[in-house]
Image: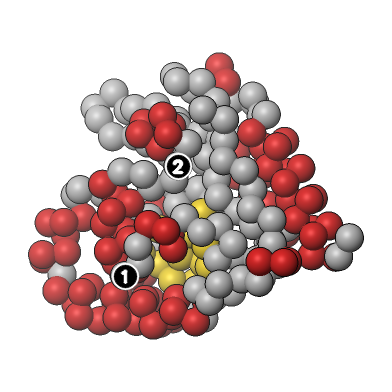
Amino acid sequence: MTERNGAADDLAALVAEVRACRLCAASLPLGPRPVLHVSTTARLLIASQAPGTRVHETGISFNDASGDRLRGWLGIDRETFYDSTRIAILPMGLCYPGRLPKGGDRPPRPECAPLWRARLLAAMPDIALTLLVGSYAQAAVLGPGRVEDRVRDFRAYLPRYFPLPHPSWRTGAWERRTPWFAAEVLPALRAAIAPLLEPARKAETVRTPPPPA
């Protein structure tokens, strides 16, 4: 067994632990269903918020309109986006947290990231760039601050991080008010991720299996 394949087996075992987690079960309106896409060879990490209802139903991250918007920003197709040998997707909360009384999803469960995130990141040593998508991911990594300010000042966080707004339906109106996002940020984003998306050597990778239906 090569060192790389041994690491992949260790990550697969860790993912099995994650998917068996029931720590927050009593607080999750639809029950636990951790959703993540990881591998030992991924070089690009998408750090997001938490699954929505459609993601919970399908077990596939960003499998909704926000995912379509994010893929448009990145300039990549679904096949590339879901190739976990190249792109890892790890939200701050791995399960759907429910709705707020006045609408919108609840924040990620606070127990989740401290329990799993460091262990999962340690098992992905090839990550070269992390996209911090939305306020929760940015706050966890960068501390307090305004999303728009960070997005506009994205160069200050390179080459390790690239802050982005959450690609919800509300962001469409925001984009129309901020033409600099399309003119300055998106070309730089696509240039930053392009060298990280070369296919990993198949002999050295093991995809983590999809979650059970």
Q: How did the renderer colour the structure?
A: secondary structure
Which amino acid type is shown beneath numbered disc 1? Gly
Q: Quadrant of residue 160?
A: bottom right
Question: For mark 2, what is the residue?
Answer: 60
Residue plotted at (64% across, 33% down): 19
Residue 130 position, x and y percent, is 51, 67
Q: Measuring 53% from the left and 76% from the top, which residue is drawn there?
A: 198
Q: Quadrant of the N terminus?
A: bottom right
Which of the pair 185/83 is nearer the observer? 83
Q: Residue under circle 1?
A: 75
Q: Is residue 54 left or right of residue 123?
A: left
Image-quadrant location for residue 204: bottom right
The one nearer the camera, 158 or 3, is 3
Secondary structure category for the residue under label 2 = loop
| Distance CA(mark 1)–CA(mark 2) | 19 Å
Q: Position of residue 31 (x, y in %)?
A: 51, 21
Is residue 113 in view from this perspective? yes
Could you say where residue 134 lies in the image, as x and y percent from the top left?
A: 37, 55
Give the amino acid at mark 2.
Ile
Task: Give whichever of 114, 2 is nearer the camera.
Answer: 2
Helix, strand or loop at label 1? It is loop
